[in-house]
Amino acid sequence: MTTTPAQRAGRSLQDVIDAVPNIADHLYNDTPGVHASTRPDLVPIPQEFTNWRDEQRAWGETAVLLNQTHHMPELMVSGPDARRLLSELAVNSLANLRPGIAKQLVACNSAGQVIGDCVLYDHGDERYELISGKTLLNWVQFKAETGDHDVTVERDENTSDNSTGRRWRFRYELDGPNAGAIFDKLVEGGAPEIKFFHTAQVLIDGIEVTALRHSMAGHQGVELSGPFEHDQRIREAILAAGTDYGLKQGGTKAYFTTNLESGWIGYPLPAIYTAEDLRDFREWLPDDGWEAKFQLGGSFRSANIEDYYVTPFDLGYGKIVKFDHDFVGRAALEAIAGQPPRRRVTLAWHDADVEEVFGSMFGDDLPYRYLELPMVSYGMPHNDEVRDTAGNLIGRSTWAGLSTNEHKLLSLGFVDAVMAEPGTEVVVVWGEPDGGSRKPRIERHRQREIRATVGTVPYSKSVGVMKQASVGGGS
């Protein structure tokens, strides 16, 4: 019999929920955070190789190399029922999944609320690799170990949770307008033509490497992965190939702002804390896992943890939700698919209001909540209130930060559909209520309403052009 993570740890997530007066308050005030975006100590990658401004500019003007090796866990699911298991959980269709095509796999609870998302590879021979999305990987592993599926699972944890000191694979993102030329120079015999969210096997310095065509920042980028023992060799080969193309290495500060221009809202709070049909999952999860240590932040506060849940439509995944198969949450999503109440947006914060927040540091009054650049959001997940100009709550702002390329402080979020048209003026409430929380990194401060203009997703014009040219890939 397989021992569950909770059995190995001795206590479960459910034990945590039962022990605290309110799980929403606990996650807001008393947890350490678990992700490298807010905890740079969790990965052995410099925060900056040069400076984050030049590293951001590199993906807009020349090329950047981003190291993804250490912060993303991986799960291998194999066996005769592996595809059936994944299809029963995925809101998107796996009908066209085959080797050479990748998917953005999204899974929900029975109410149609998101548990997590990840990248999915089909390696053939009934072997499927799930990359990133820790909460989704946990959900899939739980279903594999407790359901009636003939499958086996293997796990490669992110570096901060990995006692082996090694990973299965290195993983690098090469992006920017010169990324294609560098990739072509790098690959023995020249780079093949790879459609968006498709993969190909290439040789780099005699090593077989998997190339996934996608982009963190919006150009014809490519994600390169291969055996971990060749990590340094491949990195040096990439840097050498990029010498004449202005290639820069990007540190963690720049890396975790790439989504501001591309529009991906990563790691919403998993919708698992309340439903009775998920109690056995919570009892399977350990008390020291990510689900127990997420750290909520921002001006949005609720005593009801369910108010933090989101649907695939909130995150902009409406186009990949397919009702050609049965999956957990299908009925709930069918009920709102015709007219989802909220839509994903980019919010461009008004310069003058941002300047006032910085200016408050130099006065005698209690300052506004500090804007730490380049990534302004400090929770994981982060949620700020978004209100209309009359003061009505209309949505939430999540990932936020400064884009050197767009010369704007941007945030990603979702608002009521009637407020989602580009050009609509809204207000982001910056700072926590009641002067701040018990989180040690949050100083006493005042809240500030910051005007913002609703923008397109993706905000970057280069990303929009790339995605329009590749509609249909990897959905």
Image (cartoon, rainbow, N blue to C red):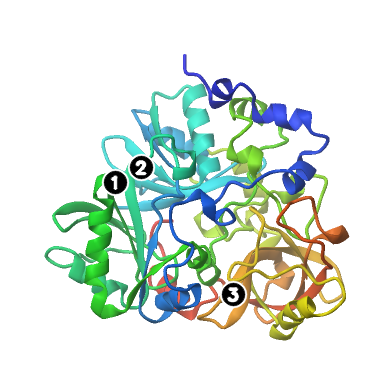
Q: Amino acid at mark 3?
A: Leu
Q: Which mark is residue 105?
A: none
- How many C-alpha atoms fall within 10 Å of the one at disc 3: few (<14), some, or many (≥20)? many
Lateral position of residue 152 relative to residue 4, left or right: left
Lateral position of residue 116 relative to residue 83, left or right: right
The residue beneath circle 2 is: 167
Image vertical order of residue 465 relative to residue 317, above or below: below
Q: Residue at x 40, y 62 (%)?
A: 472
Query: Which quadrant of the figure has residue 62?
Result: bottom left
Q: Tell which of 107 and 349 is nearer to you.
A: 349
Seen as rendered, the residue at the extreme bottom is 352
Image vertical order of residue 115 relative to residue 54, above or below: above
The residue beneath circle 3 is: 402
Tell me which numbered mark, 2 or 3, is placed earlier along the sequence: 2
Asked if the residue under mark 2 is in contact with the one under mark 1, i.e. CB atoms within 8 Å, the reply is: yes
**Residue 110, can we see it?**
no
Tell me which numbered mark, 3 or 1, is placed earlier along the sequence: 1
Q: CA distance from mark 3 to mark 1?
A: 33 Å
The residue beneath circle 1 is: 228
Q: CA distance from mark 1 to mark 2?
A: 6 Å
The location of residue 65, given as percent across then percent down, is 36, 66
Q: Residue at x 61, y 57 (%)?
A: 313
Lateral position of residue 449 relative to residue 176, left or right: right
Asked if the residue under mark 3 is in contact with the one under mark 2, i.e. CB atoms within 8 Å, the reply is: no
The location of residue 99, given as percent across then percent down, is 28, 47
